Amino acid sequence: MGSRFDDAFQRWWAWWEADRKSYPPDFLNETPRLIVDLPEFAIDAYPVTYGRYQACVAAGICAAVEFPLTTADAADYPVQNVSWDNAVAYCTWVGKRLPTEAEWEKAARGVDGRLFPWGNEWQAALVSTLQSPVGAVPGGASPYGVQDMVRDGGEWTADLYRAYPGNTDERAITAAGRDYINVGYVIRGSVSRRPAQPYPVTRRSFGGPRGGGNITFRCVRGSELPPPLEDVLVRIDVPPVPEAVTNVDLTTMVYIPAGEFVMGRLAPYIHPLNATPEGTNAMPAHIVYVDAFYIDRYKVTNREYVEFLNTLGAHAFACDGFRCAWARYSSSPPDPDAAIFVEHGQYGVDPGFETLPTDSVTWYGAAAYCAWLGKRLPTEAEWEKAARGTDGRLYPWGNEWQWIPDAPRAPYPVGSQPANVSPYGVYDVLGNKLEWVQDWYAKDYYAFSPLRNPVGPVEGEKKVRRALGGFEGFAFGLPDRSGAYLDNLGSFRCVYVPEQN
């Protein structure tokens, strides 16, 4: 049921690119994709016709509606302009009820996730019209033989309009600045006003209870009280992270031996312009023992991360149920601030940005990438030892800040600055984008952290990012640290500990 975020946002982007004068429909309201287990039910093979509805009107149950077509015999045409209340009244009168949107979607697409009742390719000739009797396009039937499920106006369902479980995107539940939650009902099966950009049967739209327009309906017979979506939800369907490799490539890593090193700083860094102390969250300096480990010589590049995304097949809700990274939904125009893009389901990197450190990755995406390679994110202590060595130096080269006027503005290709190398041979530890590490962030953690293999606080709201310094700006140095929410973006590198694998 529903769509993956990447597929829905691709439709949103295509709509926006085609016409930037009109805001795209809320395709994100059909995300995330869900696996649903429904009880059996029976559904009308056709929408309710005027002839059937008029019997309800004659019985004094349903309100009369106008038939808009100039035809002598309206009995076999789908009824239109019906309010939600009257649709409910009709279905109740005949001993049935409106379908839930889960029931409607299953009847329309079957169990194989197809986009349209007849398959995955759009065929305009198979779309039913309101200007023809029901069942006039038998080739457009669903896998179960249900007909006319894609047409102008769409069909009422029983469900109040609300976000799917697991959907926290504001655009999924609002439109034009109005909160739509629980003030109207879901319409399914409407066709797009742009023939070149058709709606799949996953498309949901909002309808006020009074209805109007071309909305029609059909009924189902099943359980008296339809189960709410939360009760039939099996799981949110996100791509599984590919199995980790079994043989870690140590040729791209640096060995850091076990032992003690100086972590943190003795005194705060003094800002040269306003004498404001900085870096107090990296105090006090203390001796820490860390077991031996391997760490990536370079930060992960855009090209390497795109390989992971293409293996994964998605970047939204795909890393432990969270967004892995930020990716544009078009290859043009290039964007130096977001070099990764996805187009027609394939990820790519803007030319010239392949060997730059990827910095569009969430903490979840960084952790998933490392796990994919049989590694993990470094602890803060591991990162700092690999960056500083054992003598407590502030910069890769020592304790004196060196302004390097010829250094390129970050980001720059990984490993391209020979001065920015740690005593162990780890590149780009000072700047060239912030790096995620494993630990939760606490400003005062150094005051009470254990002295052997610290792993950070047991919980928190933010994760630590390191490598704050750089060749431009103020020389905060290697001890500097900051916290960032897990869905913020950054770069990273991985570590491998043979004893733990």
Image (spheres, rainbow, N blue to C red):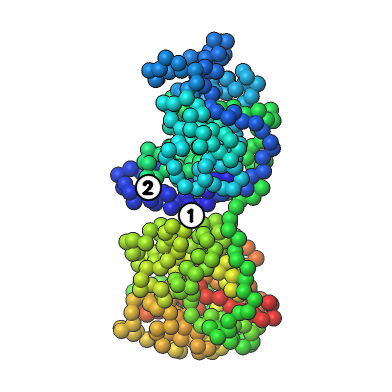
| Badge 1 density bin: few <14, some 14–19, many ≥20, Cα 10 Å | many
Tell me which residue sits at (52%, 61%) in the image: 313
Query: Would residue 405 be seen by someone viewing this image from the given angle?
Result: yes
Q: In this orientation, which residue lies closer to the viewer: 161 or 422? A: 161
In this rendering, the count of numbered labels is 2
Left or right: where 468 falls relative to 22:
right
**Mark 1 touching mark 2, by CB under 8 A?**
no
Tell me which residue sits at (62%, 26%) in the image: 97
Tell me which residue sits at (48%, 14%) in the image: 64
Give coordinates of residue 456: x percent, y percent: 61, 70
Label 2 element class: helix
Q: Cα distance, mark 1 to mark 2?
A: 14 Å
For residue 47, above or below residue 352: above
Image quarter of the N terminus: top right
For residue 18, above or below residue 403: above
Label 1 element class: helix
- Look at label 1 and name its amino acid: Asp
Give coordinates of residue 401: x percent, y percent: 39, 85
Q: In this orientation, which residue lies closer to the viewer: 221 or 481? A: 221
Image quarter of the C terminus: bottom right
For residue 454, above or below residue 133: below
Residue to which mark 1 is pinned: 6
Residue to which mark 2 is pinned: 15
- Look at label 2 and name its amino acid: Trp
Tell me which residue sits at (55%, 49%) in the image: 32
- Res 99 label: none
Q: In this orientation, which residue lies closer to the viewer: 171 or 109? A: 109
Q: N-terminal of the two: label 1 or label 2?
A: 1
Q: In this orientation, which residue lies closer to the viewer: 123 or 351? A: 123
Give coordinates of residue 288: x percent, y percent: 62, 82
Give coordinates of residue 94: x percent, y percent: 62, 19
